[in-house]
Image (cartoon, coloured by chain):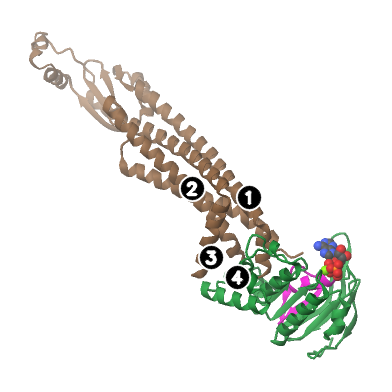
Chain colours: A green, B brown
Amino acid sequence: MDIRISGVTKVFEGDIVALDGVYFAVGAGEFVYLVGTTGSGKTTLLRVISREVLPTKGQVLVGGFDLRRMRYNDLAYYRRDLGIVFQDFRLLSHLTVLENVAFILEAMGVPPREVRDRSGFILERVGMWHRRFLKPPQLSGGEQQRVAIARAIVNAPAVLLADEPTGNLDPRTSDEIVQLLTSINASGTTVIMATHNQYLVDAYRHRVVELSRGRIIRDENQGRYAADVDL
Amino acid sequence: MSTFRYLLRDTFRLIFRHWGMSLLTLFSISAVFFLLGASSLLSLNTRHLLGNIEGQLTVQAYLKPGSDLEAARKKVQTFGNIVQIVAITPDEALEHLKARLGNRAEVITLVGENPLPPALEIRVERAAHVSSLARRLVAMAEVEDVVYAGGLAEKLSRLSVFVGRLSVGILVIAVVAAVMVLFNTVRMAVYSRRDEIHVMLQVGATQTYVALPFVLQGMLLGMMGAAFAALTLLKGYSSAISVLAATMPFLLFLRDGALLAKLGVVLVGAGICLGWIASWFAVVRYIRDAVKPL
Ligand SMILES: Nc1ncnc2c1ncn2[C@@H]1O[C@H](COP(=O)(O)OP(=O)(O)OP(=O)(O)O)[C@@H](O)[C@H]1O
Ligand SMILES: [Mg+2]
Protein backbone atom coordinates (compact mmCIF):
# COMPACT_ATOMS: atom_id res chain seq x y z
CA MET A 1 0.00 0.00 0.00
CA ASP A 2 1.49 3.30 -1.01
CA ILE A 3 0.53 6.54 0.70
CA ARG A 4 0.03 9.80 -1.15
CA ILE A 5 -0.64 12.99 0.75
CA SER A 6 -1.23 16.06 -1.42
CA GLY A 7 -1.56 19.59 -0.10
CA VAL A 8 -2.84 18.53 3.30
CA THR A 9 -3.57 21.30 5.77
CA LYS A 10 -5.00 20.70 9.21
CA VAL A 11 -6.30 23.57 11.28
CA PHE A 12 -7.46 22.58 14.76
CA GLU A 13 -9.96 24.48 16.84
CA GLY A 14 -8.54 27.80 17.94
CA ASP A 15 -6.78 28.36 14.58
CA ILE A 16 -3.90 26.04 15.45
CA VAL A 17 -2.26 25.10 12.17
CA ALA A 18 -0.79 21.63 12.77
CA LEU A 19 -0.11 20.80 9.11
CA ASP A 20 0.37 23.41 6.43
CA GLY A 21 0.26 22.25 2.82
CA VAL A 22 2.07 18.96 3.20
CA TYR A 23 3.02 16.86 0.16
CA PHE A 24 4.29 13.47 1.17
CA ALA A 25 4.47 10.13 -0.63
CA VAL A 26 5.61 6.79 0.72
CA GLY A 27 5.99 3.70 -1.45
CA ALA A 28 5.14 0.22 -0.30
CA GLY A 29 7.96 -1.32 1.77
CA GLU A 30 9.69 1.96 2.66
CA PHE A 31 11.08 2.93 6.08
CA VAL A 32 10.65 6.62 6.87
CA TYR A 33 11.75 8.62 9.89
CA LEU A 34 9.52 11.57 10.68
CA VAL A 35 11.54 14.11 12.61
CA GLY A 36 11.04 17.68 13.83
CA THR A 37 10.79 19.68 17.00
CA THR A 38 7.93 19.15 19.40
CA GLY A 39 4.65 20.49 18.05
CA SER A 40 5.89 20.34 14.45
CA GLY A 41 3.01 18.08 13.38
CA LYS A 42 4.47 14.54 13.38
CA THR A 43 1.68 12.93 15.39
CA THR A 44 -0.94 14.84 13.42
CA LEU A 45 0.50 13.56 10.14
CA LEU A 46 0.39 9.97 11.42
CA ARG A 47 -3.18 10.49 12.59
CA VAL A 48 -4.13 11.82 9.18
CA ILE A 49 -2.93 8.51 7.73
CA SER A 50 -4.86 6.45 10.31
CA ARG A 51 -7.86 8.70 9.70
CA GLU A 52 -8.18 9.81 13.29
CA VAL A 53 -7.79 13.32 11.87
CA LEU A 54 -9.51 14.56 8.74
CA PRO A 55 -7.56 17.22 6.81
CA THR A 56 -9.08 20.66 6.60
CA LYS A 57 -7.78 20.80 3.03
CA GLY A 58 -6.00 18.42 0.68
CA GLN A 59 -6.20 14.79 -0.32
CA VAL A 60 -5.01 11.55 1.27
CA LEU A 61 -4.78 8.43 -0.90
CA VAL A 62 -3.82 5.13 0.67
CA GLY A 63 -3.55 2.19 -1.70
CA GLY A 64 -5.34 4.37 -4.26
CA PHE A 65 -8.21 4.88 -1.88
CA ASP A 66 -9.39 8.38 -0.91
CA LEU A 67 -9.70 8.54 2.89
CA ARG A 68 -12.22 11.37 2.70
CA ARG A 69 -14.65 9.15 0.83
CA MET A 70 -14.29 6.34 3.32
CA ARG A 71 -17.63 5.02 4.47
CA TYR A 72 -18.50 4.29 8.05
CA ASN A 73 -17.95 0.55 7.97
CA ASP A 74 -14.92 0.62 5.70
CA LEU A 75 -12.89 2.39 8.37
CA ALA A 76 -12.58 -0.73 10.54
CA TYR A 77 -11.37 -2.79 7.57
CA TYR A 78 -8.95 -0.06 6.51
CA ARG A 79 -7.43 0.04 9.98
CA ARG A 80 -6.81 -3.69 9.89
CA ASP A 81 -4.22 -2.95 7.22
CA LEU A 82 -2.51 -0.53 9.58
CA GLY A 83 -0.49 -1.18 12.69
CA ILE A 84 -0.35 1.69 15.15
CA VAL A 85 2.16 2.13 17.96
CA PHE A 86 0.91 5.01 20.08
CA GLN A 87 3.16 7.57 21.69
CA ASP A 88 1.65 6.54 25.06
CA PHE A 89 1.38 2.76 24.34
CA ARG A 90 -2.35 2.52 25.22
CA LEU A 91 -2.09 -1.03 26.47
CA LEU A 92 -5.10 -2.27 28.42
CA SER A 93 -3.97 -2.55 32.01
CA HIS A 94 -6.51 -5.15 33.14
CA LEU A 95 -5.54 -7.60 30.41
CA THR A 96 -2.41 -9.74 30.32
CA VAL A 97 0.29 -9.24 27.73
CA LEU A 98 -1.07 -12.20 25.78
CA GLU A 99 -4.64 -10.88 25.92
CA ASN A 100 -3.52 -7.42 24.86
CA VAL A 101 -2.17 -8.88 21.66
CA ALA A 102 -4.88 -11.54 21.20
CA PHE A 103 -7.91 -9.27 21.34
CA ILE A 104 -6.95 -7.60 18.06
CA LEU A 105 -7.26 -10.93 16.30
CA GLU A 106 -10.44 -11.77 18.19
CA ALA A 107 -11.99 -8.53 17.02
CA MET A 108 -11.32 -9.71 13.48
CA GLY A 109 -13.09 -12.99 14.07
CA VAL A 110 -9.98 -15.20 13.99
CA PRO A 111 -10.69 -18.62 15.58
CA PRO A 112 -9.35 -19.14 19.16
CA ARG A 113 -6.70 -21.68 18.23
CA GLU A 114 -5.20 -19.44 15.58
CA VAL A 115 -5.42 -16.42 17.89
CA ARG A 116 -3.26 -18.21 20.43
CA ASP A 117 -0.71 -19.43 17.90
CA ARG A 118 -0.31 -16.10 16.15
CA SER A 119 -0.15 -14.09 19.39
CA GLY A 120 2.44 -16.49 20.76
CA PHE A 121 4.49 -16.26 17.60
CA ILE A 122 4.50 -12.45 17.66
CA LEU A 123 5.35 -12.27 21.36
CA GLU A 124 8.23 -14.62 20.72
CA ARG A 125 9.38 -12.35 17.92
CA VAL A 126 9.45 -9.22 20.11
CA GLY A 127 10.99 -11.22 22.96
CA MET A 128 8.02 -10.99 25.32
CA TRP A 129 6.77 -14.58 25.37
CA HIS A 130 8.21 -15.17 28.84
CA ARG A 131 6.16 -12.22 30.14
CA ARG A 132 2.86 -13.24 28.53
CA PHE A 133 0.91 -13.68 31.79
CA LEU A 134 1.93 -10.35 33.32
CA LYS A 135 -0.12 -7.21 33.07
CA PRO A 136 1.27 -3.99 31.54
CA PRO A 137 1.76 -2.17 34.89
CA GLN A 138 4.11 -4.99 35.90
CA LEU A 139 6.35 -4.36 32.89
CA SER A 140 9.23 -1.95 32.33
CA GLY A 141 8.82 0.85 29.77
CA GLY A 142 10.82 -1.02 27.13
CA GLU A 143 8.81 -4.16 27.70
CA GLN A 144 5.55 -2.27 27.35
CA GLN A 145 6.86 -0.76 24.12
CA ARG A 146 7.59 -4.24 22.79
CA VAL A 147 4.07 -5.38 23.65
CA ALA A 148 2.68 -2.28 21.93
CA ILE A 149 4.70 -3.17 18.83
CA ALA A 150 3.58 -6.80 19.03
CA ARG A 151 -0.03 -5.64 19.14
CA ALA A 152 0.55 -3.35 16.17
CA ILE A 153 2.02 -6.06 13.95
CA VAL A 154 0.03 -9.13 15.01
CA ASN A 155 -2.48 -8.57 12.21
CA ALA A 156 0.34 -8.46 9.65
CA PRO A 157 -0.34 -4.84 8.61
CA ALA A 158 0.80 -3.39 5.33
CA VAL A 159 1.76 -0.14 7.06
CA LEU A 160 3.16 0.34 10.56
CA LEU A 161 2.80 3.80 12.10
CA ALA A 162 5.06 4.18 15.13
CA ASP A 163 4.86 7.39 17.15
CA GLU A 164 8.01 7.87 19.25
CA PRO A 165 8.45 4.14 19.83
CA THR A 166 11.68 4.84 21.73
CA GLY A 167 10.24 7.75 23.69
CA ASN A 168 11.43 7.07 27.21
CA LEU A 169 13.77 4.16 26.61
CA ASP A 170 17.47 3.85 27.39
CA PRO A 171 19.86 3.85 24.38
CA ARG A 172 20.32 0.09 24.29
CA THR A 173 16.60 -0.69 24.39
CA SER A 174 16.04 2.03 21.78
CA ASP A 175 18.56 0.29 19.54
CA GLU A 176 16.73 -2.99 19.98
CA ILE A 177 13.37 -1.43 19.17
CA VAL A 178 14.66 0.13 15.94
CA GLN A 179 16.34 -3.13 14.99
CA LEU A 180 13.00 -4.82 15.56
CA LEU A 181 11.21 -2.27 13.38
CA THR A 182 13.89 -2.67 10.71
CA SER A 183 13.38 -6.42 10.66
CA ILE A 184 9.62 -5.94 10.42
CA ASN A 185 10.27 -3.57 7.52
CA ALA A 186 12.52 -6.17 5.90
CA SER A 187 9.58 -8.57 5.79
CA GLY A 188 7.69 -6.09 3.59
CA THR A 189 5.81 -3.80 5.97
CA THR A 190 5.99 -0.06 5.32
CA VAL A 191 7.23 1.68 8.47
CA ILE A 192 6.73 5.33 9.32
CA MET A 193 8.37 6.23 12.60
CA ALA A 194 8.15 9.61 14.31
CA THR A 195 11.18 10.25 16.51
CA HIS A 196 13.23 12.90 18.28
CA ASN A 197 16.24 10.62 18.54
CA GLN A 198 18.98 11.96 16.23
CA TYR A 199 21.36 9.19 17.27
CA LEU A 200 19.01 6.49 15.94
CA VAL A 201 18.40 8.38 12.71
CA ASP A 202 22.15 8.48 12.15
CA ALA A 203 22.83 4.91 13.26
CA TYR A 204 20.12 3.12 11.29
CA ARG A 205 19.98 4.92 8.01
CA HIS A 206 16.64 5.30 6.26
CA ARG A 207 14.76 8.06 4.53
CA VAL A 208 14.30 11.12 6.75
CA VAL A 209 11.42 13.59 6.47
CA GLU A 210 11.64 16.66 8.67
CA LEU A 211 8.66 18.76 9.69
CA SER A 212 8.73 22.28 11.05
CA ARG A 213 5.59 24.18 12.00
CA GLY A 214 3.52 21.84 9.92
CA ARG A 215 5.64 22.05 6.76
CA ILE A 216 8.10 19.56 5.30
CA ILE A 217 11.49 21.26 5.29
CA ARG A 218 13.73 18.27 4.46
CA ASP A 219 13.23 14.95 2.69
CA GLU A 220 16.39 12.85 2.32
CA ASN A 221 16.42 9.48 0.68
CA GLN A 222 18.98 7.59 2.63
CA GLY A 223 17.52 4.11 2.83
CA ARG A 224 17.74 0.96 0.83
CA TYR A 225 14.09 1.22 -0.14
CA ALA A 226 14.28 4.70 -1.66
CA ALA A 227 10.98 5.41 -3.34
CA ASP A 228 10.60 7.51 -6.43
CA VAL A 229 9.06 10.57 -4.92
CA ASP A 230 7.46 12.49 -7.75
CA LEU A 231 5.27 15.25 -6.44
CA MET B 1 -18.74 -18.41 14.90
CA SER B 2 -15.69 -17.60 16.99
CA THR B 3 -16.79 -13.96 16.94
CA PHE B 4 -19.99 -15.06 18.61
CA ARG B 5 -18.02 -16.85 21.32
CA TYR B 6 -15.92 -13.76 22.01
CA LEU B 7 -19.06 -11.64 22.20
CA LEU B 8 -20.73 -13.93 24.72
CA ARG B 9 -17.58 -14.14 26.80
CA ASP B 10 -17.26 -10.34 26.87
CA THR B 11 -20.94 -9.99 27.76
CA PHE B 12 -20.58 -12.25 30.78
CA ARG B 13 -17.37 -10.51 31.74
CA LEU B 14 -19.23 -7.20 31.72
CA ILE B 15 -21.97 -8.62 33.92
CA PHE B 16 -19.66 -10.33 36.38
CA ARG B 17 -16.97 -7.69 36.57
CA HIS B 18 -19.55 -5.26 37.90
CA TRP B 19 -21.54 -7.91 39.71
CA GLY B 20 -22.72 -5.52 42.45
CA MET B 21 -24.07 -3.16 39.84
CA SER B 22 -25.61 -6.06 37.92
CA LEU B 23 -27.37 -7.36 41.03
CA LEU B 24 -28.69 -3.92 41.83
CA THR B 25 -29.93 -3.56 38.29
CA LEU B 26 -31.59 -6.96 38.36
CA PHE B 27 -33.27 -6.08 41.62
CA SER B 28 -34.56 -2.75 40.33
CA ILE B 29 -35.74 -4.22 37.05
CA SER B 30 -37.50 -7.02 38.92
CA ALA B 31 -39.26 -4.55 41.18
CA VAL B 32 -40.36 -2.45 38.22
CA PHE B 33 -41.63 -5.46 36.29
CA PHE B 34 -43.33 -6.87 39.37
CA LEU B 35 -45.27 -3.64 39.67
CA LEU B 36 -46.04 -3.72 35.97
CA GLY B 37 -47.23 -7.34 36.14
CA ALA B 38 -49.29 -6.71 39.26
CA SER B 39 -51.08 -3.79 37.65
CA SER B 40 -51.77 -5.91 34.56
CA LEU B 41 -53.22 -8.64 36.77
CA LEU B 42 -55.44 -6.14 38.55
CA SER B 43 -56.65 -4.77 35.24
CA LEU B 44 -57.20 -8.25 33.79
CA ASN B 45 -59.14 -9.30 36.88
CA THR B 46 -61.44 -6.28 36.85
CA ARG B 47 -62.18 -6.88 33.22
CA HIS B 48 -62.70 -10.57 33.85
CA LEU B 49 -65.16 -9.82 36.65
CA LEU B 50 -66.93 -7.23 34.56
CA GLY B 51 -67.17 -9.63 31.66
CA ASN B 52 -68.79 -12.22 33.90
CA ILE B 53 -71.34 -9.81 35.26
CA GLU B 54 -72.04 -8.34 31.86
CA GLY B 55 -73.02 -11.77 30.59
CA GLN B 56 -76.03 -11.57 32.87
CA LEU B 57 -76.94 -7.93 32.39
CA THR B 58 -80.67 -7.44 31.75
CA VAL B 59 -83.00 -4.52 31.98
CA GLN B 60 -86.70 -5.20 32.61
CA ALA B 61 -89.15 -2.72 31.19
CA TYR B 62 -92.74 -3.14 32.45
CA LEU B 63 -95.28 -1.74 30.06
CA LYS B 64 -98.61 -0.15 30.92
CA PRO B 65 -101.39 -2.75 30.86
CA GLY B 66 -102.84 -3.19 27.40
CA SER B 67 -99.82 -1.76 25.53
CA ASP B 68 -98.80 -3.21 22.21
CA LEU B 69 -95.92 -5.46 23.21
CA GLU B 70 -94.67 -6.11 19.68
CA ALA B 71 -94.65 -2.40 18.74
CA ALA B 72 -92.71 -1.57 21.90
CA ARG B 73 -90.21 -4.34 21.14
CA LYS B 74 -89.60 -2.99 17.62
CA LYS B 75 -89.08 0.50 19.01
CA VAL B 76 -86.56 -0.63 21.61
CA GLN B 77 -84.78 -2.69 19.00
CA THR B 78 -83.67 0.55 17.33
CA PHE B 79 -81.83 1.79 20.44
CA GLY B 80 -78.54 0.07 19.71
CA ASN B 81 -76.03 -1.76 21.93
CA ILE B 82 -78.69 -4.40 22.50
CA VAL B 83 -77.90 -8.08 22.40
CA GLN B 84 -81.35 -9.54 22.75
CA ILE B 85 -84.94 -8.55 23.53
CA VAL B 86 -87.44 -11.00 24.88
CA ALA B 87 -91.07 -9.93 24.86
CA ILE B 88 -93.05 -11.39 27.74
CA THR B 89 -96.84 -11.38 27.59
CA PRO B 90 -98.79 -11.30 30.86
CA ASP B 91 -99.67 -14.96 30.40
CA GLU B 92 -96.03 -15.96 29.96
CA ALA B 93 -95.07 -13.92 32.97
CA LEU B 94 -97.68 -15.74 35.00
CA GLU B 95 -96.37 -19.09 33.79
CA HIS B 96 -92.82 -18.14 34.82
CA LEU B 97 -94.02 -17.06 38.19
CA LYS B 98 -95.99 -20.23 38.70
CA ALA B 99 -93.01 -22.32 37.70
CA ARG B 100 -90.87 -20.51 40.16
CA LEU B 101 -93.29 -20.70 43.04
CA GLY B 102 -93.83 -24.44 42.54
CA ASN B 103 -96.28 -25.97 45.00
CA ARG B 104 -97.13 -22.61 46.48
CA ALA B 105 -98.60 -21.58 43.15
CA GLU B 106 -102.19 -21.65 44.47
CA VAL B 107 -101.57 -18.29 46.01
CA ILE B 108 -101.66 -16.78 42.55
CA THR B 109 -104.45 -18.83 41.07
CA LEU B 110 -106.62 -17.46 43.82
CA VAL B 111 -106.36 -14.01 42.30
CA GLY B 112 -109.10 -13.61 39.74
CA GLU B 113 -107.43 -11.89 36.87
CA ASN B 114 -103.76 -11.76 35.83
CA PRO B 115 -102.26 -8.60 37.39
CA LEU B 116 -98.91 -8.93 35.65
CA PRO B 117 -98.09 -6.32 32.98
CA PRO B 118 -96.55 -7.15 29.63
CA ALA B 119 -92.77 -6.72 29.82
CA LEU B 120 -89.60 -6.55 27.76
CA GLU B 121 -86.46 -8.26 28.97
CA ILE B 122 -83.49 -6.56 27.31
CA ARG B 123 -79.90 -7.84 27.35
CA VAL B 124 -77.23 -5.23 26.69
CA GLU B 125 -73.62 -5.58 25.66
CA ARG B 126 -71.85 -3.49 28.25
CA ALA B 127 -72.52 -2.38 31.78
CA ALA B 128 -71.83 1.15 30.68
CA HIS B 129 -74.89 1.03 28.41
CA VAL B 130 -77.38 0.14 31.16
CA SER B 131 -78.19 3.56 32.57
CA SER B 132 -78.61 5.31 29.22
CA LEU B 133 -80.90 2.54 28.07
CA ALA B 134 -82.92 2.81 31.28
CA ARG B 135 -83.32 6.54 30.78
CA ARG B 136 -84.60 6.08 27.23
CA LEU B 137 -86.98 3.39 28.36
CA VAL B 138 -88.43 5.55 31.10
CA ALA B 139 -89.01 8.28 28.55
CA MET B 140 -91.22 5.98 26.47
CA ALA B 141 -94.94 6.61 26.90
CA GLU B 142 -95.91 2.95 27.11
CA VAL B 143 -93.32 2.09 29.76
CA GLU B 144 -94.56 2.13 33.32
CA ASP B 145 -91.51 1.03 35.19
CA VAL B 146 -87.92 0.01 34.59
CA VAL B 147 -86.03 -2.38 36.81
CA TYR B 148 -82.40 -3.26 36.47
CA ALA B 149 -79.68 -4.63 38.70
CA GLY B 150 -77.21 -2.37 36.99
CA GLY B 151 -75.91 -0.41 39.95
CA LEU B 152 -73.05 -2.77 40.71
CA ALA B 153 -72.22 -3.37 37.09
CA GLU B 154 -72.12 0.32 36.42
CA LYS B 155 -69.82 1.00 39.34
CA LEU B 156 -67.65 -1.87 38.25
CA SER B 157 -67.46 -0.53 34.74
CA ARG B 158 -66.36 2.84 36.05
CA LEU B 159 -63.79 1.07 38.26
CA SER B 160 -62.58 -0.84 35.24
CA VAL B 161 -62.01 2.37 33.32
CA PHE B 162 -60.11 3.77 36.29
CA VAL B 163 -58.01 0.64 36.69
CA GLY B 164 -57.29 0.75 32.97
CA ARG B 165 -56.01 4.31 33.22
CA LEU B 166 -54.03 3.48 36.33
CA SER B 167 -52.27 0.61 34.64
CA VAL B 168 -51.44 2.74 31.61
CA GLY B 169 -49.93 5.26 34.03
CA ILE B 170 -47.97 2.54 35.77
CA LEU B 171 -46.89 1.17 32.41
CA VAL B 172 -45.46 4.52 31.36
CA ILE B 173 -43.66 5.04 34.66
CA ALA B 174 -42.36 1.47 34.68
CA VAL B 175 -41.04 1.69 31.13
CA VAL B 176 -39.28 4.97 31.86
CA ALA B 177 -37.83 3.65 35.12
CA ALA B 178 -36.63 0.39 33.58
CA VAL B 179 -35.03 2.15 30.63
CA MET B 180 -33.28 4.61 32.93
CA VAL B 181 -31.90 1.92 35.22
CA LEU B 182 -30.66 -0.19 32.31
CA PHE B 183 -29.30 2.82 30.48
CA ASN B 184 -27.30 3.86 33.52
CA THR B 185 -25.86 0.42 34.14
CA VAL B 186 -24.74 0.02 30.55
CA ARG B 187 -23.39 3.57 30.50
CA MET B 188 -21.28 2.77 33.56
CA ALA B 189 -19.94 -0.33 31.87
CA VAL B 190 -19.16 1.68 28.73
CA TYR B 191 -17.27 4.30 30.73
CA SER B 192 -15.34 1.75 32.74
CA ARG B 193 -14.11 0.27 29.47
CA ARG B 194 -13.68 3.43 27.42
CA ASP B 195 -9.92 2.92 26.93
CA GLU B 196 -10.57 -0.51 25.58
CA ILE B 197 -13.32 0.79 23.31
CA HIS B 198 -11.02 3.45 21.87
CA VAL B 199 -8.15 1.07 21.27
CA MET B 200 -10.43 -1.53 19.73
CA LEU B 201 -11.88 1.00 17.31
CA GLN B 202 -8.41 2.28 16.45
CA VAL B 203 -7.10 -1.15 15.58
CA GLY B 204 -9.99 -2.14 13.35
CA ALA B 205 -12.79 -3.65 15.40
CA THR B 206 -16.15 -2.92 13.80
CA GLN B 207 -18.57 -0.74 15.71
CA THR B 208 -20.98 -3.63 15.93
CA TYR B 209 -18.36 -5.89 17.47
CA VAL B 210 -17.54 -3.27 20.08
CA ALA B 211 -21.19 -2.42 20.82
CA LEU B 212 -22.69 -5.90 20.94
CA PRO B 213 -21.41 -7.07 24.34
CA PHE B 214 -22.93 -3.97 25.91
CA VAL B 215 -26.21 -4.41 24.08
CA LEU B 216 -26.33 -8.07 25.05
CA GLN B 217 -25.56 -7.10 28.63
CA GLY B 218 -28.56 -4.79 28.68
CA MET B 219 -30.84 -7.33 27.03
CA LEU B 220 -29.74 -10.09 29.39
CA LEU B 221 -30.24 -7.95 32.49
CA GLY B 222 -33.65 -6.83 31.22
CA MET B 223 -34.65 -10.39 30.45
CA MET B 224 -33.47 -11.86 33.76
CA GLY B 225 -35.03 -9.07 35.79
CA ALA B 226 -38.36 -9.45 34.01
CA ALA B 227 -38.25 -13.25 34.19
CA PHE B 228 -37.60 -13.16 37.92
CA ALA B 229 -40.49 -10.73 38.41
CA ALA B 230 -42.84 -12.79 36.23
CA LEU B 231 -42.03 -16.00 38.08
CA THR B 232 -42.54 -14.58 41.55
CA LEU B 233 -45.65 -12.69 40.51
CA LEU B 234 -47.42 -15.57 38.79
CA LYS B 235 -46.39 -18.08 41.44
CA GLY B 236 -47.57 -15.74 44.18
CA TYR B 237 -50.78 -14.97 42.31
CA SER B 238 -51.77 -18.58 41.73
CA SER B 239 -51.18 -19.57 45.36
CA ALA B 240 -53.07 -16.51 46.57
CA ILE B 241 -55.95 -17.33 44.22
CA SER B 242 -56.24 -20.93 45.38
CA VAL B 243 -56.43 -19.78 49.00
CA LEU B 244 -58.98 -17.08 48.19
CA ALA B 245 -61.05 -19.37 45.99
CA ALA B 246 -61.31 -21.90 48.81
CA THR B 247 -62.55 -19.33 51.30
CA MET B 248 -64.57 -17.08 48.99
CA PRO B 249 -65.81 -19.20 46.09
CA PHE B 250 -68.27 -16.51 45.01
CA LEU B 251 -65.46 -14.18 43.92
CA LEU B 252 -64.67 -14.53 40.27
CA PHE B 253 -60.88 -14.46 39.90
CA LEU B 254 -59.05 -14.89 36.66
CA ARG B 255 -57.64 -18.43 36.57
CA ASP B 256 -56.91 -18.80 32.87
CA GLY B 257 -53.52 -20.52 32.86
CA ALA B 258 -52.84 -19.81 29.19
CA LEU B 259 -53.57 -16.12 29.66
CA LEU B 260 -51.29 -15.92 32.70
CA ALA B 261 -48.52 -17.68 30.81
CA LYS B 262 -48.98 -15.16 28.01
CA LEU B 263 -48.64 -12.34 30.52
CA GLY B 264 -45.35 -13.87 31.69
CA VAL B 265 -44.06 -14.11 28.14
CA VAL B 266 -45.09 -10.52 27.42
CA LEU B 267 -43.26 -9.32 30.55
CA VAL B 268 -40.05 -11.15 29.62
CA GLY B 269 -40.32 -9.94 26.03
CA ALA B 270 -40.74 -6.39 27.26
CA GLY B 271 -37.68 -6.85 29.49
CA ILE B 272 -35.58 -7.91 26.51
CA CYS B 273 -36.86 -5.06 24.32
CA LEU B 274 -36.32 -2.39 26.94
CA GLY B 275 -32.84 -3.78 27.65
CA TRP B 276 -32.06 -3.61 23.98
CA ILE B 277 -33.33 -0.07 23.49
CA ALA B 278 -31.69 1.28 26.65
CA SER B 279 -28.28 -0.27 26.03
CA TRP B 280 -28.36 0.66 22.35
CA PHE B 281 -28.80 4.31 23.27
CA ALA B 282 -26.16 4.01 25.99
CA VAL B 283 -23.47 2.63 23.74
CA VAL B 284 -24.09 3.70 20.17
CA ARG B 285 -23.74 7.42 20.70
CA TYR B 286 -20.50 6.86 22.58
CA ILE B 287 -19.01 4.70 19.85
CA ARG B 288 -20.09 7.07 17.08
CA ASP B 289 -18.31 9.90 18.87
CA ALA B 290 -15.25 7.78 19.58
CA VAL B 291 -14.80 6.84 15.94
CA LYS B 292 -15.44 10.30 14.54
CA PRO B 293 -12.22 11.80 13.12
CA LEU B 294 -11.02 15.15 14.44
N1 LIG C 1 -6.59 17.60 19.05
C1 LIG C 1 -5.92 18.77 18.93
N2 LIG C 1 -6.59 19.91 19.13
C2 LIG C 1 -5.96 21.09 19.01
N3 LIG C 1 -4.67 21.20 18.68
C3 LIG C 1 -3.97 20.10 18.47
C4 LIG C 1 -4.56 18.81 18.58
N4 LIG C 1 -3.61 17.88 18.31
C5 LIG C 1 -2.48 18.57 18.05
N5 LIG C 1 -2.68 19.89 18.13
C6 LIG C 1 -1.69 20.94 17.88
O1 LIG C 1 -1.09 20.70 16.65
C7 LIG C 1 0.30 20.97 16.69
C8 LIG C 1 1.08 19.74 16.25
O2 LIG C 1 0.90 18.71 17.20
P1 LIG C 1 1.52 17.28 17.04
O3 LIG C 1 1.00 16.46 18.17
O4 LIG C 1 1.25 16.79 15.67
O5 LIG C 1 3.06 17.57 17.24
P2 LIG C 1 4.26 16.53 17.32
O6 LIG C 1 5.18 16.86 16.23
O7 LIG C 1 3.74 15.14 17.37
O8 LIG C 1 4.90 16.91 18.71
P3 LIG C 1 5.68 15.96 19.75
O9 LIG C 1 7.02 15.75 19.19
O10 LIG C 1 5.72 16.76 20.99
O11 LIG C 1 4.90 14.71 19.89
C9 LIG C 1 0.61 21.37 18.12
O12 LIG C 1 0.69 22.78 18.18
C10 LIG C 1 -0.58 20.90 18.90
O13 LIG C 1 -0.85 21.77 19.98
MG1 LIG D 1 3.72 13.60 18.81
Amino acid type, callout 4: Ala
Amino acid type, callout 2: Gly
Task: Measure how far apart labels 4 and 1 are at the Cα level.
Answer: 25 Å
Amino acid type, callout 1: Met
Q: Chain of mark 2?
A: B
Asked whether the beta carbons under mark 4 and mark 1 sit within 8 Å of each other, the answer is no
Q: Which residue appears at 57% of the width and 46% of the height? A: B21
Task: Sort mark 2 into few (<14), some (14-19) or many (20+) by Cα contacts within 10 Å.
Answer: many
| Residue B230, disc | none
Q: Which residue is mark 3?
A: B6
Q: Which of pointers 2 and 3 indicates the residue nearer the eye?
A: 3
Task: Measure how far apart labels 4 and 3 are at the Cα level.
Answer: 11 Å
Asked whether the beta carbons under mark 4 and mark 3 sit within 8 Å of each other, the answer is no
Determine the secondary structure under disc 3: helix
Q: Which residue is mark 4?
A: A102
Chain-order first, disc 2 or disc 1: 1
Determine the secondary structure under disc 1: helix
Task: Sort mark 4 into few (<14), some (14-19) or many (20+) by Cα contacts within 10 Å.
Answer: many
| Residue B188, disc | 1
Q: Nearer the viewer, residue B207 or B103?
A: B207
* Mark 4 C-beta closer than 8 Å to ligand 2: no
Asked whether the beta carbons under mark 2 and mark 1 sit within 8 Å of each other, the answer is no
The part of the chain drawn in magenta is A41-68
Q: Which residue is mark 2?
A: B271
Can I make out residue A67 in this image? Answer: yes
Does residue A187 lie above or below B220 as drawn? Answer: below
Amino acid type, callout 3: Tyr
